Amino acid sequence: VFDEAHHLENVATNFFGKHFSHYQLIDLIGDLQRQAEIDFPLSDGDNLLGYARGLKQRVDQFVALFPAQKGRFPLDPVSEKVSGWKETLDNLVNGLEELAKRCLKLGKNHGEIWNLFGDRAALLQKDLYHIAGPKQAGTDYFIHWYERRERAVSLSATPVRVAEELENCLYNSVQSCIMTSATLTTGGDFKYMRERLGIDETSKTLCLHSPFDYKERTLLYVPEQGFPEANDPKYSDAICDRIYELLKISRGRALVLFTSFRAMDMVAEFLESRLAYPVLVQGTASRHALLDQFRETTDSVLLAVASFWEGVDVSGDSLSCVLIDKLPFEVPSDPVIQARMKAIDEEGGKPFFQFQIPRAILTLRQGVGRLMRSTTDRGVIGIMDIRLYSKGYGRIFRTSLPASPVVRELDDVKKFFAAEIEKENENDGRF
């Protein structure tokens, strides 16, 4: 049984791939050093520890080959064009192989833990060579890419498609497989998930209606026609002003979701000196601490990206408004996304409609779903992206969203919250 099965493609991509991070080797060297201090007199451990330190220098030399720009990029341009690639890679691969041999030799007399160290070194060597070495026959369906962070580089080789692997390793080995999620359909159709996960057309599907009364208890606000689109230079100023206006109307009590840290930081800076309500920003504290503070401080506003689009379960007065900066299309320059779009294109398909839009819809539905967490909740969903109406594909997004009445004027949002205040006052008067 797979819950949150909309993540299965990404999880399977990671599972069926190969990965190497220089921090894995740094961790191994640290474990070796600590164990050597326990198992050997200082003189006996010098040889191994000296070799391990030399290996750390080799991995530092390897990391130095990569451009400093942070992000995820295809590996081929680096491996094919950077001077000294083969020599530096071979030096590190051979060093890992030798480290594995030395650890396994120690395992004969000094305990199983050294065999485990040897196995770790051998696996790192194997994965590194598989990812960064000469392309092997039968690996054309793998994407080779790297991720550069502040001081770290990780390398991966992941499959373009996981449908065949899932069929061989999962579907063919179990009598039944159940997948559940609130976001498995786009436009009420399971077609996208079937194609991506290799699920047979004869498999059974069940789509249940939401228990929440979106029509009576929510509004969907989209800015008026003429509001700048996301690629307009005026968009940044417009979205800061509009989010500010909406948060004043909602009296705080809002989760604001962004598609980038840059946009989140920009709005956070704008609100900091203007908004009369506490502003909480992802990155200033742990996720758990931020959510606790958000629940406890009823009029607070939480600004967040990425993981906060899912798994945020705040019911009641603390969350009466969910605002989303724009349609959550993934970065098209990501090497995995690029490879999957290319594969669809080469098969004669339309990657934008068959891949990018469905993925963005699933993410958007997760974000929208943060508002209604119980049948007594009510509030406003605001999507600050007029492409929902200005682009032809906007209709596909709209048909995938809950049946909230749509408004495009701030006055309608004011009326909604004014009615809510009136109901609160009526309820207070009964006691």
Image (cartoon, rainbow, N blue to C red):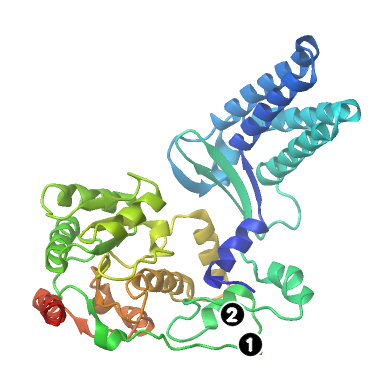
- Residue kind at label 1, given as amino acid type: Glu
User: To which quarter of the image does residue 300 belong?
Assistant: bottom left
Q: Residue beneath label 2, please?
A: 194
* Residue 1 seen in this snapshot: yes
- Disc 1 to disc 2, C-alpha distance: 7 Å
Numbered circle sitting on residue 34 = none
* Quadrant housing the C terminus: bottom left
Residue 21 is situated, as x and y percent measured from the top left of the image, at: 60, 40
Q: Is residue 242 above or below residue 172?
A: above
- Residue kind at label 2, given as amino acid type: Arg
Q: Is residue 113 left or right of residue 368?
A: right
User: To which quarter of the image does residue 165 belong?
Assistant: bottom right
Q: Residue at x 64, y 24 (%)?
A: 56
Q: Quick one: which residue is furthest to the left in this view?
A: 411
* Residue 87 seen in this snapshot: no
Q: Residue at x 60, y 77 (%)?
A: 179
Mark 1 or mark 2: which comes first in sequence? 2
Q: Residue at x 27, y 61 (%)?
A: 256
User: To which quarter of the image does residue 258 belong?
Assistant: bottom left
Residue 260 is situated, as x and y percent measured from the top left of the image, at: 34, 54
Q: Quick one: which residue is furthest to the front in this view?
A: 431
* Quadrant housing the N terminus: bottom right
Q: Is residue 259 above or below residue 226?
A: above
Q: Residue beneath label 1, please?
A: 201
CB-based contact (under 8 Å), mark 1 and mark 2? yes
Q: Residue 167 versus residue 301: which sits nearer the camera?
A: 301
Residue neighbourhood size for the residue with mark 1, other residues' Cα within 10 Å, grouped as few (<14), some (14–19), many (≥20) = few
